[in-house]
Amino acid sequence: MIQSYEIQICLGSSCFSRGNREVVQVIRDYLKKKHLDDKVMLRGARCMDRCSEGPYLIINGKTFVKTGVQDVEKLLEKELAEPGK
């Protein structure tokens, strides 16, 4: 696995109303389950000015829009996978 990752999630009111609280919890649970807490920095951000595209998520500079709870775990599996797997 790459040394470290950064995940940013918009915590603005629009993304909040679109379900980002649940998305944050799924991310936290996933990181804990996979023992990635020390390799992934999860940061909340104030409004990222992409309100109509929320929940808005950035993983190592790669943007994901309209990220639903049902999509998060599969997305994390792909984006946090070890190279070559």
Image: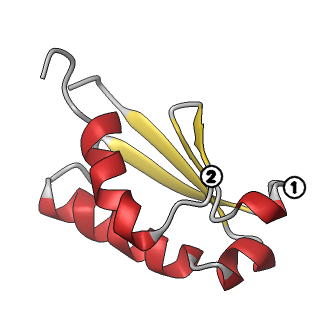
Q: Residue 82 bears which disc, if any?
A: none
Q: Which residue is mark 2?
A: 65
Image coordinates of residue 63 in percent, x first then y, are 61, 39
Quarter-of-image position of residue 4: top left
Image coordinates of residue 53 in percent, x first then y, are 73, 58
Q: State the residue lying farthest toward the right.
A: 49
Q: Residue 49 bears which disc, if any?
A: 1
Q: Quadrant of the N terminus?
A: top left
The CA span between labels 2 and 1 is 12 Å
Q: Quadrant of the C terminus?
A: top left
Residue 85 seen by the camera: yes
Q: Is residue 82 above or below residue 14?
A: above
Q: Residue at x 80, y 63 (%)?
A: 52
- Marks 2, 1: nearer the viewer: 2
Q: Residue at x 48, y 67 (%)?
A: 68
Q: Is residue 68 above or below residue 25?
A: above
Q: What is the secondary structure assignment of the residue under circle 1?
A: loop
Q: Is 14 in front, or is 31?
A: 14
Q: Is 2 in front, or is 79?
A: 79
Tell me the amino acid under the disc marked 2. Answer: Val
Tell me the amino acid under the disc marked 1. Answer: Asp
